[in-house]
Amino acid sequence: MRIGRMNEILKEIPEQYLDREFSTRDIANAMGANATTINNFITTLKSLDFVSGRRRFRFTEPGVRYALLIRSGEARAREVLGEQLSKIEYFDVIKHMLQQTGKLSIFEIGEEMVRRYNKKWRNPLTLKAYGAAIASILGFTGFGHYRGGILRLDEETEEMESPVPYLSVEKMVKILEILFPVGGKIHELARVLGTNERRMSQELACCRALGFVRHSRRGFYELTAEGREIACCVDVLRRRRFKEHLRSSGYKKLIERLYSENGKITLVRLGEILAEEYNREWSAVTKRTYAKKFLNWLKYSGMVIKVQGGYKLRE
């Protein structure tokens, strides 16, 4: 679990659980939260030595201090967390790598955990989730700057890289319609849509990259003026507006690459292009998954026509 979500839950936990044993169910019931979310929350706390136990848990002394400090201000809480990280080997490993390379992607962090600690993670979303959690924790404590899937030693001022296409346009429109008009919290949005919060975060990142959503504060998302328009307009206008935003977004590099090749677009070739542009070594299944999503965007916006054996970009 990323540090922002962990901190949100810590702030909401009733204080009586800070000095007594509890189970996952106790916390989930007390907060009206999903049991899977609380399981991930407790796993994250255990990895930081903020709680101990197996079926029943108890906050450690540093865990109690952090939980109390995070409610009153982040500065002193960061100091406590920084002290904990200095005692945990795999954070030192990532710090050393970052000092050598200057920047690390969350995939690289996940892959290093697999290699060094003999983990069996293969799904790219799993690698991404663990990598993002570690990167967000290091960024929160001030060791590096985490943004857009990259942990950098020095702050980066350029715009974040557009995330991999994670969702269809139809799912995107559902998200915008639910957020209209006042926005909402990510865990509420995930519950309504029946989507895992980690995946929801990536889907929202795509909405942000297209200019439809902004992340106004921790865990809370709201529509931009463009997002409100997409959520409310009729289908014909929605398709036209989506095309305009797609062609002016960070994804225009992918579209320009397709135009430069001037050939037939197949899922296999599109998956290869995506892997090359994002510099990833994905499996054939992963390439196909992301290719289907990006092709969905192109089809919805009317930018491709069906031809024998694939698609072709309109002139």
Image: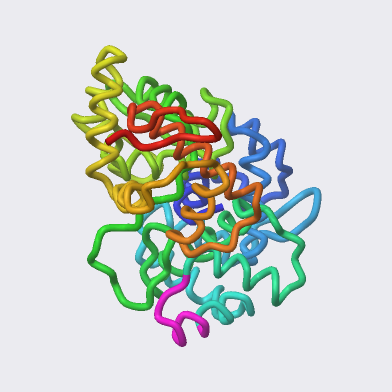
Name the residue nearer the viewer: 137 or 104: 104
What is the span of residues highlighted in magenta in the rendered image? 96-104
Colouring: rainbow
Residue at x 67%, y 54% (from the top left corner): 43
- Whether residue 298 sits left or right of residue 182 in the image: it is right
The number of numbered badges drawn on the structure is 0
- Spot occupied by residue 81 in the image (x, y as percentages of width and height): 50, 69
Q: Quadrant of residue 77?
A: bottom left
Q: Is residue 244 magenta?
A: no
Name the residue nearer the viewer: 9 or 216: 216
Q: Is residue 150 above or below residue 169?
A: below
Residue at x 64%, y 35% (from the top left corner): 28
- Spot occupied by residue 255 in the image (x, y as percentages of width and height): 33, 46
Q: Is residue 25 above or below residue 121?
A: above
Residue at x 60%, y 51% (from the top left corner): 125
Name the residue nearer the viewer: 314 or 4: 314
Magenta stretch: dominant SS? helix
Outermost top residue: 234
Residue at x 46%, y 42% (from the top left corner): 264
Q: Considering the image in quadrants, where does the C terminus appear? A: top left
Q: Is residue 171 above or below residue 203?
A: above
Q: Quadrant of residue 222?
A: top left
Outermost front residue: 308
Name the residue nearer the viewer: 62 or 152: 152
- Spot occupied by residue 256 in the image (x, y as percentages of width and height): 30, 50
Outermost left residue: 225
Q: Is residue 206 above or below residue 85?
A: above
- Spot occupied by residue 154 in the image (x, y as percentages of width and height): 32, 77
Q: Is residue 102 magenta?
A: yes
